[in-house]
Every structure is written in C-alpha cells, then in structure tokens.
Image (cartoon, helix red, strand yellow):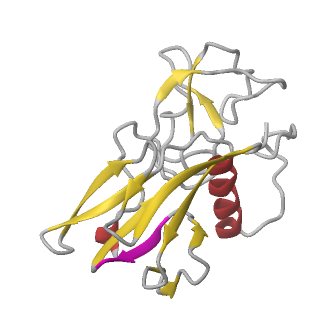
C-alpha cells in the first residue's frame, strides 16, 4: 500500500522526482503521527550533537517553545516564538511556524535542529483497512507479523527469521535507506 492510502503493485511507481517524493513521504509520515520528533542539541560548540526526544511542550530558552499540535490528520510540531527567533535563517514574524524535518532554530543565542527522522525497528505489523504487500517478496504482510517500516519512505517489509526481507539487501526496495538494523540516523547536524 502506498503512503497516500492507495494500493499499488511494487512495480508500479509514480513518476516523481525522488527528492520531492522523499520530502512528501516524510511530511505524510509526520502528519499521520508515526514519527517521534526530536531535537539535535549541540555539545562542545557545534563539534558534537545529542538527540533529545520530544514528548510534549518544550521550551527553547525564554523566547521560544515547541508545541505538539493535534489535528484530524495527526500531529504537527509548531514553534511559538518571539520575532527575534529564526527558523532556517528567517525570523518567525507571525510568532508561530509549523516545523519540518531538519529545520534549524536559533533562539536566545542557541542553535538547535528539529528532526522527525526515526530508526528502523522490528515491530508487529499493525495491519490496516487494506492488504499490504512486502515490496521485496511480494507476499502479504499479515497483522501481527514481524516487520519494519522504512524510516525514509514508510513502506513496510517483512523482517523475521523466515522472511528477512528488510535486511535481505543493503538498501530499501523503494528508496536509498540503509537496511542494517543498527544503521543509525541518515542525517545529523555534524554533516553540516
């Protein structure tokens, strides 16, 4: 099943730029509430970074705060801030901005990054209204079956001793996400 809720055979791929597709899928995953947001906080200047999971309201000094907003389509993170706060170099003129993956926030002389990236994790497949097929083996993924949802594109793959579809190859069938279960995050601020 595609992220947009429609069924699509594994060989039927939409004609869309891969960067735009990845951005849209990250936004879709964020909107459906399946991704745990976090901040990357600097240590020793900007030489090293630490990840801080977000669970609710979070203050970023005296002039800004993060808030998880709930909407019918899921959760979004918003930044409530004074005009002196900048997101990706631009002031938060209206006092509120919806955050996206990898947004840089500068508040009260502190630079942090917001992220919605998650790690690959073997979990029981939750099931859904429509039948989902693994893109690697093309077999149905039944509710309760051990599986991995690709952190980048959101496509489900089997992952068990009998069907190690996620780790079978070095990359996800649908995108360039590494499939090692200990692969770590694709992006950290250290790459800047």
Residue drawn at the location 16% of the way across and 75% of the way down: 45
Q: Nearer the viewer, residue 42 or 7?
A: 42
Quarter holding the N terminus is top right
| Residue at the far left in the pictured view | 44
Task: Specify the segment rendered in magenta.
Answer: 102-108
**Is residue 132 shown left or right of residue 116?**
right
Dominant secondary structure (helix, strand or loop) of the stretch shown in magenta:
strand
Residue drawn at the location 47% of the way across and 78% of the way down: 82
Q: Nearer the viewer, residue 191 or 88?
A: 88
The spot of residue 118 in percent (x, y) is 47, 45
Q: Nearer the viewer, residue 162 or 182?
A: 182
Residue drawn at the location 38% of the way across and 52% of the way down: 185
**Is residue 182 shown left or right of residue 28?**
left
Q: Is residue 149 magenta?
A: no
The spot of residue 4 in percent (x, y) is 81, 46
The spot of residue 14 in percent (x, y) is 83, 57
Is residue 2 among the parts visible in the rendering? Answer: yes
In the image, residue 85 sits, relative to residue 124, either above or below, namely below
Quarter holding the C terminus is bottom left
Q: Where on the picture, by quarter, is residue 131?
A: top right
Is residue 174 among the parts visible in the rendering? Answer: no
**Is residue 145 shown left or right of residue 8?**
left
The spot of residue 138 in percent (x, y) is 74, 29
In the image, residue 169 sits, relative to residue 58, either above or below, namely above
Q: Is residue 106 magenta?
A: yes
């Amino acid at each position: 099943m595609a992220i947009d809720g429609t069924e699509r055979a594994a060989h039927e791929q939409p004609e869309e730029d891969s960067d735009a597709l990845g951005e849209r899928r990250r936004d879709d995953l964020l909107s459906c509430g399946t991704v745990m947001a976090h901040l990357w906080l600097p240590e020793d200047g900007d030489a090293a970074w630490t990840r801080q999971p977000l669970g609710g309201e979070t203050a970023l000094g005296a002039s800004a705060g993060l808030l998880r907003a709930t909407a019918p389509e899921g959760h979004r993170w918003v930044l409530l801030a004074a005009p002196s706060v900048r997101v990706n170099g631009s002031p938060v003129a209206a006092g509120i901005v919806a955050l996206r993956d990898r947004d840089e926030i500068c508040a009260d002389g502190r630079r942090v990054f917001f992220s919605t990236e998650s790690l690959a994790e073997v979990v029981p497949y939750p099931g859904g209204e429509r039948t989902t097929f693994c893109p690697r083996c093309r077999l149905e993924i039944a509710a309760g079956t051990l599986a991995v949802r690709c952190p980048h594109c959101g496509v489900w793959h089997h992952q068990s001793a009998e069907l190690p579809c996620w780790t079978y190859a070095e990359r996800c069938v649908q995108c360039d996400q590494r499939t090692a279960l200990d692969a770590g995050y694709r992006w950290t601020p250290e790459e800047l």
